[in-house]
Amino acid sequence: MGRYRPTSPEELPKFAGVRTFMRMPHVRTLEDVNFVVVGIPFDDATTFRSGARFGPEGIRSISAMIRPWHPVHDIDVFEHLSGVDYGDVAVVPGDVEATCEKTARDFQAIAAAGVTSFAMGGDHSVTLGELRGLCAVHGPLALVHFDAHVDTSEGNYGRKYDHGTPFRRAAEEKLVETSRSIQIGIRGGRAGPEYYQQSRDMGYEVIAMHEFEQLGVAAVLERIHKRVGDMQCFITIDIDAVDPAYAPGTGTPEVGGFTSREILNLVRGLKGLNIKGGDVLEVIPAIDTGEITAYLAANLLYEMICLQALAHRGG
Amino acid sequence: MGRYRPTSPEELPKFAGVRTFMRMPHVRTLEDVNFVVVGIPFDDATTFRSGARFGPEGIRSISAMIRPWHPVHDIDVFEHLSGVDYGDVAVVPGDVEATCEKTARDFQAIAAAGVTSFAMGGDHSVTLGELRGLCAVHGPLALVHFDAHVDTSEGNYGRKYDHGTPFRRAAEEKLVETSRSIQIGIRGGRAGPEYYQQSRDMGYEVIAMHEFEQLGVAAVLERIHKRVGDMQCFITIDIDAVDPAYAPGTGTPEVGGFTSREILNLVRGLKGLNIKGGDVLEVIPAIDTGEITAYLAANLLYEMICLQALAHRGG
Amino acid sequence: MGRYRPTSPEELPKFAGVRTFMRMPHVRTLEDVNFVVVGIPFDDATTFRSGARFGPEGIRSISAMIRPWHPVHDIDVFEHLSGVDYGDVAVVPGDVEATCEKTARDFQAIAAAGVTSFAMGGDHSVTLGELRGLCAVHGPLALVHFDAHVDTSEGNYGRKYDHGTPFRRAAEEKLVETSRSIQIGIRGGRAGPEYYQQSRDMGYEVIAMHEFEQLGVAAVLERIHKRVGDMQCFITIDIDAVDPAYAPGTGTPEVGGFTSREILNLVRGLKGLNIKGGDVLEVIPAIDTGEITAYLAANLLYEMICLQALAHRGG
Amino acid sequence: MGRYRPTSPEELPKFAGVRTFMRMPHVRTLEDVNFVVVGIPFDDATTFRSGARFGPEGIRSISAMIRPWHPVHDIDVFEHLSGVDYGDVAVVPGDVEATCEKTARDFQAIAAAGVTSFAMGGDHSVTLGELRGLCAVHGPLALVHFDAHVDTSEGNYGRKYDHGTPFRRAAEEKLVETSRSIQIGIRGGRAGPEYYQQSRDMGYEVIAMHEFEQLGVAAVLERIHKRVGDMQCFITIDIDAVDPAYAPGTGTPEVGGFTSREILNLVRGLKGLNIKGGDVLEVIPAIDTGEITAYLAANLLYEMICLQALAHRGG
Amino acid sequence: MGRYRPTSPEELPKFAGVRTFMRMPHVRTLEDVNFVVVGIPFDDATTFRSGARFGPEGIRSISAMIRPWHPVHDIDVFEHLSGVDYGDVAVVPGDVEATCEKTARDFQAIAAAGVTSFAMGGDHSVTLGELRGLCAVHGPLALVHFDAHVDTSEGNYGRKYDHGTPFRRAAEEKLVETSRSIQIGIRGGRAGPEYYQQSRDMGYEVIAMHEFEQLGVAAVLERIHKRVGDMQCFITIDIDAVDPAYAPGTGTPEVGGFTSREILNLVRGLKGLNIKGGDVLEVIPAIDTGEITAYLAANLLYEMICLQALAHRGG
Amino acid sequence: MGRYRPTSPEELPKFAGVRTFMRMPHVRTLEDVNFVVVGIPFDDATTFRSGARFGPEGIRSISAMIRPWHPVHDIDVFEHLSGVDYGDVAVVPGDVEATCEKTARDFQAIAAAGVTSFAMGGDHSVTLGELRGLCAVHGPLALVHFDAHVDTSEGNYGRKYDHGTPFRRAAEEKLVETSRSIQIGIRGGRAGPEYYQQSRDMGYEVIAMHEFEQLGVAAVLERIHKRVGDMQCFITIDIDAVDPAYAPGTGTPEVGGFTSREILNLVRGLKGLNIKGGDVLEVIPAIDTGEITAYLAANLLYEMICLQALAHRGG
């Protein structure tokens, strides 16, 4: 049984108490901890709607409803793991590079302590900092990336770092091993075919949404497992991978996305991968409805945590 | 042709008039009536969000858009049935037991008059009162239960009666025949495997959501019909059985639920069952968007009413 | 390369600037133009919720996110076409007939100039004016109509022209060739079986939603292509064809509709038809959430424009 | 004690039951009735936002909170009066003239029965029908008109009847005696000085908002009483007379309006006038927040009803 | 300088971090603490809208914007006081009496430690528990009560304890000294004159809203100070004392309330009273807009804390 | 009569057409133009909520309701002035300095052409760019600044330029003559007394909100006129100067602000000043309700434009 585990509803109703992820203790420690959930409330690197700086707050709030035992995997997370809400990175508003640096420092410390990190964005620019931190400890990672966008642009408006460039930068910095990495769910009108091509040119495998529609969940999972193999990997989910009906609260929505069941099954199907961390990005509570976007995001983090618990049990 | 039927839009536009369910007359009579729709605006037995006390109002409001003839069943409800909006149970705010008792009294009277009841919640605690009332007249019922939660807990916070316990109490009180009853759509992180097991231990059949995903609508309908057979039954739908994308306005949403077409086809497929009553629960208008939750709830009640009309025509 | 094309995000961020459809120039010219997008902000012909007069504004606003190149068709619209935002028809509030006349005049001028028109409603009554304008130039058109409702009523409340009658009037006026026309997605409780029958009696083919559920996208597309053949046609999409989860912001929603992927694939599958114009109707921004309805509507217009681009490239 | 009076909360909680104004019985009778509250859900005569057709529903819903005894006047309405919710006028969507005629017929019948009418709009065009009905029985009326707009335009877009013209038409038809009538709260940018002048030319006294700010409540009340004297009168309140902070849910808001306390004190100060009827208009629930606009509107109707009760007690 | 003080924005931006009141440490200690802020998330004792159980969360969230130094009093709270966010009382959902008991126990412990408590509701029923706890240590208190309602009813629906009865129960239990207590802002239609009279009969002084309008802030403050004198007192603010324009997010709003500046000046004017605790109640985030209700509530608590700081500095 | 003036509602209803400020032509010219309205959609320099990048769109949208003639000043803007909507500055997302530079360049060009500029923010950081542009042509300006915050901080998080620093930078760069400048409406808890003092130390006159409450509108206007005299000046209004009840849609709201009538009268009272430009900032449409914040902002710009028209008429 893990040292740190959520407050039970019997002790305090789910709607009560200071909000932390899944009601885990908010302790800034890495001792006796297997995983941390961390917020990175930064949204000054977006190209359309801002507001994702409140993503961690929104996700924490509704995550109170999630319980430790997973019915499909039949596992209780906290029987195998000890986890805390590590709080938020001390982001620097308006300064993507300083924020990236601070993020890297925090995540390196976490990884160095042998703790797995699960992060709540924030816009997608924040993933670069996470990857820098993790790579400093673990070396390059395979990337499993669910998104409507490839996020491998050269840059926008002369900015090298924004929410459309992290996976170009990550490849350039050799934080990810693109030949073992894959992007799934890409779609929508773009500037031109070079949009998809740039990812492939960098070595990423890309499964566009219309390809996913043909392949289905099982075949795509096979492709992912084949691609990643046993390499240590990082899972990153831009919530806009999901259809706006299921995730209206986001900054650059794209029609025709995943359903909630598809994305849940995709993440569940990552069982067996060697996961070093993960994140869910681009939740904007101010334009969410009934907290459904935030709750789906919280559940996707929970699904990742379950994968870690399975690995612990298995291993 | 039934004595009581809705005001037609030709007489009064659909957006006009005092709101009653489907614009049926609001008459507190059981004479010349085949079915009633009743509200039970109680929400003091919830464990997360409150607000379902306004469920009946929200459902009534948007139900104005529903018309009597059903295109799949090819039947006009009011050619076969006479129906009224019976108003709301005089619930006792904050007192789940007194409310339950009042509900039971009303529903017993309705059932005793040979009238079928369709209820609008309220949180799921109110179903116990309905079942007590119906059972007093009809004896034990088979239960067809769509929900994200089993609602068979021992109790929460020392309360015997809340929205997580009605189907334990109903089984204990022998209001339902669990060996002929079935729960469909259950999912989500829970305290542990005992969550599902407690229902099975009480005799319920449980089809978890991930099992439904494998089986599909047709196979699940077969399981339901086999289970219930010709026993008199009660249909209860917690709107959170449906995915939050389709039903954001509810109190304890759970990701990965039914689509609207799945739940509609599941209810349509109950044709042939011997239905004594039904309800739709847990609609919270204050957090709904575009009344989509309330409208889906209203339609699910309408689908149940159509089943009764089919039985009348058939019988 | 077309003369008129959108402002690129590099020039001006997507969230900046006066809103026009897809950020195309707002020029009231037909010279050097292949297609126009036009708003028809009229909503005084509705039978339930009003508010679609703000539809064009809502669609324009979020359409800023759409880019010219389509990943499935692999085509850049503006390499083949020149397009402008033609602004709105000078509708006459409260006067459906005067508005229809003004609409007809504008669309006749557009068609006469050899320009294809794509319109943003407004309620569905506005399509009649479009059809009058187009028919005056092109002669009768085949109709490909996605909707929850047939819109072929005799009239409501003594009004000959409202959002429930355009396709009866269009047939009576011989603007559409019903024997080459088809309606898809029809569903929901109605006054009686005559509701569907009236369309069929006028010569329309009708694929109800429950029939679509059996057939699937591919088979339905085959039916459409067979029906329309090479006749010149008009595509009209009432956004309520789509499920309220995907399109909450509309006036007469109907549960159990298309998913976003289905409707997108249906429109993409119209490739090869001889399209003279199209429209998307009944978007009400005031009750939308996260602009998801408006964005889906904008994308459906974009999909139609892509079909025209494909035809240009092909032809 | 009146025959018809509201359901008490003891009998049924305020949040329960089919919604009627102040929970009065919904009975379409004029016998043993002193006053009726009637909805006129028409909004096809507006020049900006539509949606006021749902005004009566919104006002009814929240009016459940109002109780019979008034603390300032120290009077219990239903000790002196019998009142019912008469339901809605069977408006004709899209047809302002037919709706006006139907309204006139209903209100003439009400007035002829010696019953006072209080109406819930709808847009301001509906007042003309009310005045026609009342004038047919009582002869011309003095008008006490609170509004941001004079509503005495010649017409807009060639329409003689819309929400900007009722008080020109009423004057032309000699339904109101303009020399005894007064308009208060007028403000906002207009086409030109003729906007205010047209009202004065027709004989109305006009107190612009900036004049009210100088005069204050007491002096304005004096002006009203002096103007109206003992002539029979009609009170009409466009909710946009109030500042958007207090009444966001309306169609043509204007900044710098009355506070809630000012408008309440203005209506309370009409005590002693010979009131034959009144209405509150232009509430749009879809853009309201927390029902504050609808609740203020409901209270303004209640204040008018209290004035009638005072007159009964006094007389 | 107090031991516990808020995280500064320089350390962590105001929009970042786990939400606590004013970003004070969330520590469940009473050592080296002068005041605590505590949430009491209970709303099962309401008579209209539920949802105040999320009040503490909403207040905490936006309270991040409040800084320690007060410009009118010219005092920095944390130069004089050490304060923590004590978390929430472990309320018992649906059980007002058990919750009251738990609340009393917690607040007695706080008071016994010489710590001042400031509570965030929750509906107004929770104040009784606070008063029981405080009275057990301090003896009876004078009450300064801002509210639209007297909350001195005998009971509703047979319940002795709900949000309309706390100050009757408190008087009966001699927790408050009514002869030194005062209620301000009372208004709105009620069942009858006994509504106000019952408070006066119990010994409370009552200043109705219409009396406040005549008297103004300064005179009312004089009345309060005269009434309370130097007796130890408790300040309770039902947010519905404020006008719905300023506080839309509440359960039983009443038109014609205080402006934000009036209520702020009223609380500031309590300087010099011997304050033992206070609370702000009835905030419902789900129906708030732009968090304005929650932010006003947070500021009112801050104003109370400033009064304590002034007393410390003074004393 | 000016060359450029708004589209009249007779030509096109107010709810129709591509949205420009007050429906003026969107022309990027400075010829035959007296004033321009310009958007600066930048919000990456905020310290709490982001979202003001959509401010210009929100203000344009609802500004359609404003008409040219002002009832208090009795002047028709466009009889004296020619005005256009100049579109938006091509801001650089995430780069406050580049945006500032671009803004300065645009505004210098505008000023050099003898055209007066009125800008729509964007967060308050954008004013620095405006001032740089204007000062390059006109030399230093007196500042009339309405705000809840002084915005004269040294910097936050190491950033020299954000929405809390523009008036320190402006003073340092000698863009404003602080001895002729004044800040009004400042309030709210701050880090310490140095918050107010820093402004005074730089030479600004500061009228805190609690001082305004004592002084009233007339006396404050006298102070402003005395301070500014006949120096050329710039008016800058942070919408959070206004109370959240009147302006909920903003990023750093502060309770206890101006009412709409106060701020309108304050701006009207600036008549006679030698105004070279002005702006309204910090409108966030995503958290507005009923567009009331955007509409008040639009009206404040209109009031400034009226002042210019008065000056033209006068001069």
Image (spheres, coloured by chain):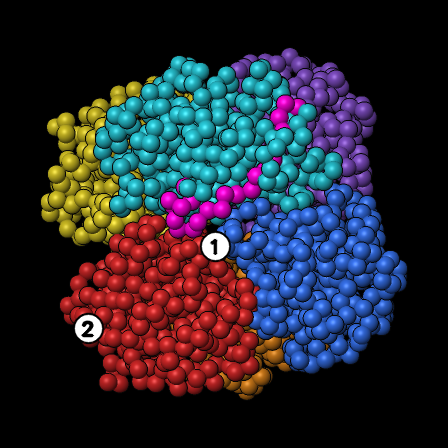
Chain colours: A orange, B blue, C red, D cyan, E purple, F yellow
Question: Please, what is the three-letter code of the amino acid marked with disc 2?
Answer: Gly
Q: Which residue matches tag 2?
A: C114
Quadrant of residue B149 in the image? Answer: bottom right
Q: Is residue E212 above or below residue F234?
A: above
Q: What element carries label 1?
A: loop
* Mark 2 → mark 1, Cα distance in angstroms: 37 Å
Quadrant of residue D192 in the image? Answer: top left
Which residue is located at x 73 percent, y 65 percent?
B235
Quadrant of residue F281 in the image? Answer: top left
Q: In this view, does F103 lie above or below F200?
A: below
Question: Please, what is the three-letter code of the amino acid marked with disc 1?
Answer: Phe
Nearer the observer, F88 or C153: C153
* Rendering coords of residue A27 (x, y %): 65, 54
Nearer the observer, E97 or D183: D183
Looking at the rendering, the stretch of residues picked out in magenta corresponds to D79-100
Q: In this view, does D266 lie above or below E223?
A: below
Nearer the observer, F127 or D313: D313
Crowding at label 1, few (<14), some or many (≥20) Cα neighbours within 10 Å? some
Q: Is mark 2 on a helix, strand or loop?
A: loop
Q: Which residue matches tag 1?
A: C48
Chain at numbered mark 2: C
Which residue is located at x 85 percent, y 59 percent?
B137
Quarter holding the N terminus of chain A is: bottom right
* Rendering coords of residue A171 (x, y %): 42, 76
